[in-house]
Structures are given as structure tokens and as C-alpha cells.
Amino acid sequence: MNWIILVIAGLFEVAFAFCLGKAKEATGNEMYFWYLGFLITCGISMVLLIKATQTLPIGTAYAVWTGIGAVGTVLVGIIVFKEPATFLRLFFITTLVISIVGLKVVSQ
């Protein structure tokens, strides 16, 4: 169950990075709403990470959490913010996914 909580925490990490990207593009009051979204999603992500680390090894949980956030944020950047999808970016994201899966496999 805590692996599911950890994955959800990682998705909220992607959400708070998305909110930062949208806040950078916004102006006026809309910018503040995106920053509020950032604070809310950041808080939820941290609470879920804390919950997951009550039974999972902290090193593995943190690495998986940041990995999900990194992969998700790069994909959101490519899809939503039209960042370049070069071969090397996709190659290294793929190696990161393989590493995250490897950590999950070798953890109790």
C-alpha cells in the first residue's frame, strides 16, 4: 500500500512543478492562483512522502519519489510546455525509469 502512496506523492510532485511552470507564464491574479496550487500540491506530496517512509526505506522512497517527479516533470515539459524532446533527453529519462524500477525490485 505504501508503494501506491509513494507513487501518488510523486505525481503530486509533478503537479507542483507544473504549477510553477504555469505561474511563470501567467500574469496578475492568475499567477497567484498557480502559486497557491504549487503550495497545496507541494504540501500533499510531502505528507504522502512522510506516510510512505513510515514503512519503506527512506533512501529508496526518496529516490523513487524524486525519480517520478523528474520523469513526470520532463514529460510535462515536453508535452505541455513544448520543450525539446531530443534523443539524449529521452535516453536519459529512460535510464532513470529503469533505475527507479530497479530500486523497487531490490527493496523489501
Image (cartoon, rainbow, N blue to C red):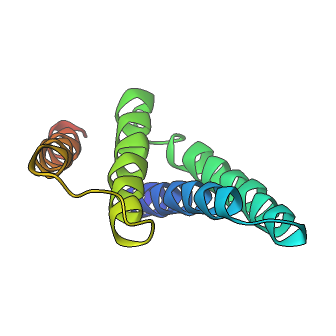
Which quadrant does the C terminus fall into?
A: top left
- Which residue is situated farthest in the top direction here? 59
Report the front residue among 77 and 68.
77
- Which residue is situated farthest in the right direction here? 29
In the image: residue 67, left or right of residue 96 = right
Report the front residue among 22 and 73.
22
In the image: residue 100, left or right of residue 79 = left
Q: Which picture quadrant has residue 29? A: bottom right
In the image: residue 37, left or right of residue 94 = right
Report the front residue among 1 and 4.
4
* Residue drawn at point x = 56 percent, y = 54 percent: 17
Q: Which picture quadrant has residue 102? A: top left
Which quadrant does the N terminus fall into?
A: bottom left
In the image: residue 40, left or right of residue 83 = right
* Residue drawn at point x = 37 percent, y = 52 percent: 68
* Residue drawn at point x = 80 percent, y = 64 percent: 31
Residue 38 point in image, percent of width and height: 71, 57
Residue 83 point in image, percent of width and height: 35, 58
Up/down of 91 relative to 29, above or below: above
Residue 27 point in image, percent of width and height: 80, 65
How many numbered callouts?
0
* Residue drawn at point x = 42 percent, y = 55 percent: 73
Residue 28 point in image, percent of width and height: 88, 66
